[in-house]
Image (cartoon, coloured by chain):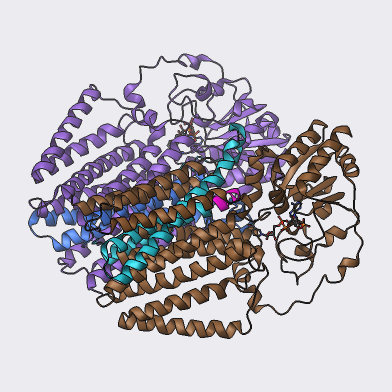
Chain colours: A cyan, B brown, C blue, D purple
């Protein structure tokens, strides 16, 4: 990858704003699923783990990378599955009650 | 477009999926779709990575992924609803560990040539990822009751903390100045110890807030690993989680009515509290029968059900809904008073009651029920304890002092369903159990509720 | 500047999200000042105009760049001044009424 | 850090200022500070640019900035509140023009070597910037009443549009394929013509929505220029405005109750409307005296004031507040019904009444007043017209059909203060003026209100 340091810094700064803004309207009901979903998302470190393991050399790097792949996979897979299980509970609700949960403004479409 | 550019473009689309996922997750209507979009983005990102130029050891990678999946899927599928917080903690911890390992592994190759910026990112990722790893392990142990849920302060913990901090500082300077792999490994070890020391003094009731904080930590560690590998995807995703996790931690602490610093460092800086409510056990308790309570409920005008952790343990959500429907058919006005931190995770009660198809309109937030508590005839406390403990209002020395509570004591009558006089999560006595207005119905919540249903039918 | 095309694209995509999210809670009272303030912000094209004029060569570029500097300056200066004039009107309000205008949630700090 | 990196870092901080500024501007409490933060960021960005490596012609740059400032500051300072929308349009248009010029100027140097990506960005910027330039000029002319505010559809406009679109397409392909400067210039000319054709058919009442849309256009043009120059600062700032402007346009259109496509293309696709309310002028009108109305108001229980554009023209905001205070002292319940598009810009009435220190609690939104309109004794319509025109509810052929209105006709009595029977912005007749419940008080709003104040004092 050839991004400049300042390019990466810009991406970081903008992501901070997106991260703050995007969840600023969350209802307390969803605190736990949101935390769990976010938890799954940082499992993207699996991509980094794969690259380090797959392009590195030497025993130490291979061992560290292999461990990282295992741990990161647990993070990703477990994270999404557990979040989905939690959210499954909400699905039983009918249209009416679902509408009541929605914030009134139109701005909540993902 | 080069192959690398194609990969980067796909990664950018995956990053967009993650943003959309978070946005979905913060709206009740789109939460589930949001999670699935996130999962789809992740799948694409992982699959794409197999096309990375010069990627070797494909089989080792596949084996790693298979092992990880084989461990995680059953764990995530089997876990009981009540144990979800510790599950999240565990998955978060391994993520932090992976971030630290990735940075270490990359540093192992590049440390001689790494610039100071890269070294700094490596050290940050190792430090934060390490803290998140052992910190999450301790929260897991606390919630899974492998150890006490009470705050644990080691002897001389302050001194230990200072020594560790100085050591970490030395390793950081060393690592920055010399790009030294040894320094990075030592820093990792220090971080692992520090993670333990960081979470031990946190009281069990505050643990979910700490999980959220460690979640944000892992996000930042992943972002730092992304800076090491110069991968925008990791930076975006990690930072997203870091930022939103920080905000979420703040929101949760607010819901518990306690400043974050208090949650994290309260036990270390606290003076030994005088045992305020000791010796209270010789006070008298009124025990009721199911039939008494059935009549009380059947002829009430307004009943508020306050569910708590015990409802989840007993899996009594369907039974309580049955009782509520029965009472409503008799013309009783029934609503649920949901405390934001009832249960073991924020939203725990909402999730459970939604599972039992309780209409959303009946789920009232704390402030709503408190406003009408004076006109309430009976408060039915089902497996809750701390969230109705008046000590949070009255006793400045109490560990839960300052937490907003459901003012059950302002109602005409209070009925507690629990199995014993044992305290709740915070481990403190509840004076409301001894209140003259209170009736105790001992036993498992589900059993008692089924009996109540039968009794109300004939009342 | 040496940013890669994909780095710039990432910055663009993230900015889209920030732009949408950051104003999604705006009250109708503020539509016009917000529009006017945003108008001033895109006056940052002045920076681009200065660079094109100052580093370019040839008569055509100089003329185009010079015109661009003038127009962009009008955009920046006029935009901020007029927005400030509009917002000045709101300042007369006392604390009580101001609190009433505020959205209840804590998420509105800039 | 190289000098360039230092510059980029400062620019990044400026970009953060812009984000914070937008965030501030969307909260009533921080709006002014937000604007100042944006201005500060801009100042720093401009000052920093003087340190750009190899920047020449410093004096020419300074002269350009001085000229621009000398034109803009007096214009922005002198403009009357009621003319602010056209001022915003003008400043927006020159920004779009600048973006197009920057891209053209850069292309003039680089077109032989430019890649297809750069060429695309140049052409996009030229196209959108050009449309924004002349489009804004036409909105300015419409609002400043240099031309009619009604929709203007040129003969054969559809054909003209199609010809232009084909021509533009040809220029784009030519420009992309050959990196040709001639194509870019021709595209610019086509864009200028297209900007005029785009805005001419928009009815005056919808012009603010178009200003907002053109504002978003300019943002995107600036972002594209940023891509040409490969400057993150321009990309971030331009995209921010492009995205937020698009959302804002949507919000405004919603406030007017009209879909965006209708606003933009309504006049072109419309069938000639049958003159629904023609011949209505021979209906009788009841004219009242100031004293009649003073008594009506003084003995009412509940009065709703509906201010409109005429209030702004007459600068009667202080006088209306005086009248309201007087009535309240007499025990009359007074509130203001603020239509979202009363006046000539969204929020226009709020700004004016805030200037007159009307307490915020008295400013009610449309839905609030409509809910209590049945219990309202008198609606005092001060210089408003379209926003209370029942045709928006009743007459599907009317140009304002579908816009939510303040249901003044549901009150007991309606008093109109205006100078004549002339229609409002939308240029259509208002049946409510002829309603038996309506009293007309002709004259300038400020004069009439002062007389009313005197009369109420003695009533
Ligand atoms: N929501 C969160 O985010 C979160 C997370 C972690 C901790 N916490 C903390 O957890 C506490 C939550 O308060 P809470 O009132 O919901 O719970 P609690 O204070 O922990 O009390 C739960 C009560 O349920 C009873 N119980 C357990 N199993 C039962 C069963 N099968 N049938 C009937 N009763 C049963 C227990 O009494 P017996 O043993 O006598 O039956 C216990 O007193 C707060 O202190 C909160 O700070 C909250
Ligand atoms: N808010 C926005 O975003 C915006 C922007 C542009 C356009 N618009 C459109 O503008 C219209 C706004 O409706 P509105 O009801 O506020 O205004 P309006 O329909 O334009 O009516 C204003 C009325 O004020 C009267 N008037 C003018 N000067 C006066 C004076 N000195 N004293 C007393 N009366 C005076 C005029 O009647 P006389 O000539 O008889 O006195 C006119 O009928 C809507 O059609 C809206 O769509 C809104």
Picture quadrant where residue B236 is located = bottom left
B407 vs B153: above or below: above
Q: Nearer the viewer, residue D162 or A19?
A: A19
In the rendered image, residue A28 lying in the magenta stretch gets the answer: yes
Q: Nearer the viewer, residue D310 or B138?
A: B138
Picture quadrant where residue D272 is located = top left
Rendered residue at 24%/76% (across/down): B113
Visible in this render: residue D24?
A: no
Q: Position of residue B136 (x, y in %)?
A: 53, 65
B104 vs B75: above or below: below
In the rendered image, residue B232 lying in the magenta stretch gets the answer: no
Q: Tell which quarter ligand 1 is in.
A: bottom right
Q: Quadrant of the C terminus of chain B?
A: top right
Visible in this render: residue A60?
A: yes
Left/right of residue B56 with respect to residue D353 in the rendered view: left
| Most frequent secondary structure within the magenta stretch | helix
Picture quadrant where residue D174 is located = top left
Question: How many marks on residues?
Answer: 0
Q: Position of residue D222 (x, y in %)?
A: 27, 51
D6 vs B167: above or below: above
Q: Which residues are magenta?
A: A24-34
Q: Position of residue D169 (x, y in %)?
A: 17, 34
Q: Nearer the viewer, residue B269 or B420?
A: B420
Q: Position of residue D334 (x, y in %)?
A: 67, 40
Q: Nearer the viewer, residue D366 or A95?
A: A95
Left/right of residue D6 with respect to residue C24 in the rendered view: left
Rendered residue at 60%/82% (across/down): B157
Rendered residue at 36%/63% (across/down): A66
Left/right of residue B189 with respect to residue A31 in the rendered view: left
């Amino acid at each position: 990858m050839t991004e400049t340091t300042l390019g990466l810094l810009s991406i970081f700064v903008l992501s901070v704003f997106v991260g703050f803004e995007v969840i600023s309207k969350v209802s307390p009901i969803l605190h736990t699923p949101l935390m769990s979903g976010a938890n799954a998302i940082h499992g993207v470190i699996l991509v980094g783990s794969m690259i380090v393991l797959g392009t590195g050399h030497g025993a130490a790097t291979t061992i560290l990378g292999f461990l990282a792949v295992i741990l990161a996979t647990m993070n990703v897979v477990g994270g999404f599955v557990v979040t989905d299980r939690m959210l499954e509970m909400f699905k039983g609700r009918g249209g009416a009650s679902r509408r009541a949960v929605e914030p009134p403004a139109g701005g909540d479409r993902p | 477009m080069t192959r690398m550019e194609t990969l980067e473009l796909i990664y950018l689309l995956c990053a967009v999926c993650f943003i959309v996922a978070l946005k979905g997750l913060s709206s009740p209507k789109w939460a589930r779709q949001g999670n699935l979009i996130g999962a789809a983005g992740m799948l694409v990102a992982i699959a794409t990575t197999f096309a990375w130029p010069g990627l070797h050891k494909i089989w080792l990678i596949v084996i790693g992924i298979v092992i990880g999946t084989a461990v995680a899927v059953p764990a995530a599928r089997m876990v009981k609803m009540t144990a979800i917080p510790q599950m999240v903690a565990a998955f978060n911890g391994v993520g932090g560990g992976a971030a630290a390992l990735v940075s270490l592994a990359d540093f192992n190759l590049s440390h001689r040539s790494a610039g100071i910026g890269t070294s700094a990112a490596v050290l940050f990722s190792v430090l934060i990822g390490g803290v998140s790893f052992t910190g999450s392990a301790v929260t897991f142990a606390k919630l899974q009751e492998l150890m006490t849920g009470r705050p644990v302060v080691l002897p001389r913990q302050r001194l230990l903390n200072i020594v560790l901090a100085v050591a970490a500082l030395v390793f950081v300077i060393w690592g920055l100045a010399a790009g030294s792999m040894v320094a990075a490994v030592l820093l990792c070890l220090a971080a692992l110890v520090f993670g333990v020391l960081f979470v031990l003094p946190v009281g069990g009731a505050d643990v979910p807030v700490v999980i959220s904080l460690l979640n944000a930590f892992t996000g930042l560690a992943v972002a730092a690993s992304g800076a090491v590998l110069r991968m925008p995807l990791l930076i975006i995703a990690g930072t997203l989680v870091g930022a939103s996790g920080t905000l979420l931690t703040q929101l949760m602490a607010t819901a518990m009515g306690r400043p974050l610093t208090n949650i994290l460092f309260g036990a270390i800086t606290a003076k030994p509290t005088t045992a305020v409510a000791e010796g209270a056990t010789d006070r008298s308790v009124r025990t009721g029968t199911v039939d008494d309570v059935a009549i009380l409920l059947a002829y009430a005008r307004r009943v508020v059900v306050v569910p708590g952790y015990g409802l989840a343990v007993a899996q009594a959500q369907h039974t309580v809904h049955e009782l509520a429907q029965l009472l409503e058919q008799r013309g009783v006005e029934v609503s649920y008073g949901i405390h934001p931190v009832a249960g073991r995770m924020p939203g725990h009660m909402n999730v459970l009651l939604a599972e039992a198809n309780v209409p959303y309109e009946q789920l009232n937030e704390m402030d709503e029920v408190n406003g009408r508590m004076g006109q309430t005839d009976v408060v039915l406390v089902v497996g809750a304890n701390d969230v109705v403990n008046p000590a949070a209002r009255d006793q400045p020395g109490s560990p839960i002092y300052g937490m907003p509570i459901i003012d059950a004591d302002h109602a005409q009558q209070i009925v507690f369903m629990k199995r014993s006089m044992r305290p709740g999560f915070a481990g403190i006595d509840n004076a409301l159990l001894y209140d003259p207005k209170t009736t105790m119905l001992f036993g498992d919540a589900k059993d008692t509720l089924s009996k109540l249903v039968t009794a109300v039918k004939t009342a």
